[in-house]
Image: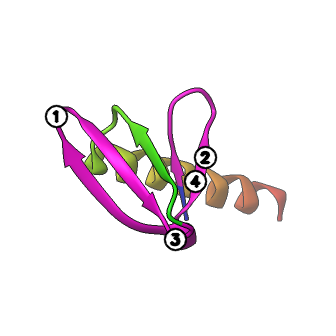
């Protein structure tokens, strides 16, 4: 699964250790110790990822 951030930035959830919401931003703590920030809440990130996953499944069905 992926987290879709601003400006076409994408993060693979396998590399994420934690999501921390603070002062209107979400910090994404990565396994390698790096930190990314986004203005999206964890709930919004989840919805964006689910929409992508659902769209990919529908495209795959149409190809069969």
Which residue: 83% across, 65% down? 64
Q: Are marks 2 and 4 in contact (CB under 8 Å)?
A: yes
In reply to whether residue 22 is colored magenta, the answer given is yes
Q: Which residue is mark 3?
A: 31
Which residue: 55% across, 73% down? 14
Secondary-structure class at tag 1? loop
Residue 57 falls in image quadrant: bottom right
Q: Are marks 3 and 1 in contact (CB under 8 Å)?
A: no
Crowd rating for badge 1 (residues with CA inside 10 Å; few <14, some 14–19, many 20+): few
* Sequence-earlier tag: 1 or 4: 4
Give residue 39's position: percent from left, percent from top. 34, 31
Query: Label 2 to label 4, Cα distance in Å?
Result: 4 Å
* Sequence-earlier tag: 1 or 2: 2
Q: Which residue is mark 4?
A: 11
Give residue 36's position: percent from left, percent from top. 47, 45
Q: Which residue is mark 1?
A: 23
Q: Is 25 situated above or below 45? A: above
| Dominant secondary structure (helix, strand or loop) of the stretch shown in magenta | strand
């Amino acid at each position: 699964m992926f987290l879709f951030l601003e400006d076409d930035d994408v993060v693979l959830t396998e590399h994420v250790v934690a999501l921390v919401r603070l002062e209107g931003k979400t910090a994404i703590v990565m396994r390698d110790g790096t930190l990314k920030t986004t203005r999206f809440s964890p709930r919004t990130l989840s919805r964006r990822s689910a929409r992508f996953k659902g769209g990919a499944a529908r495209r795959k069905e149409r190809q069969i």
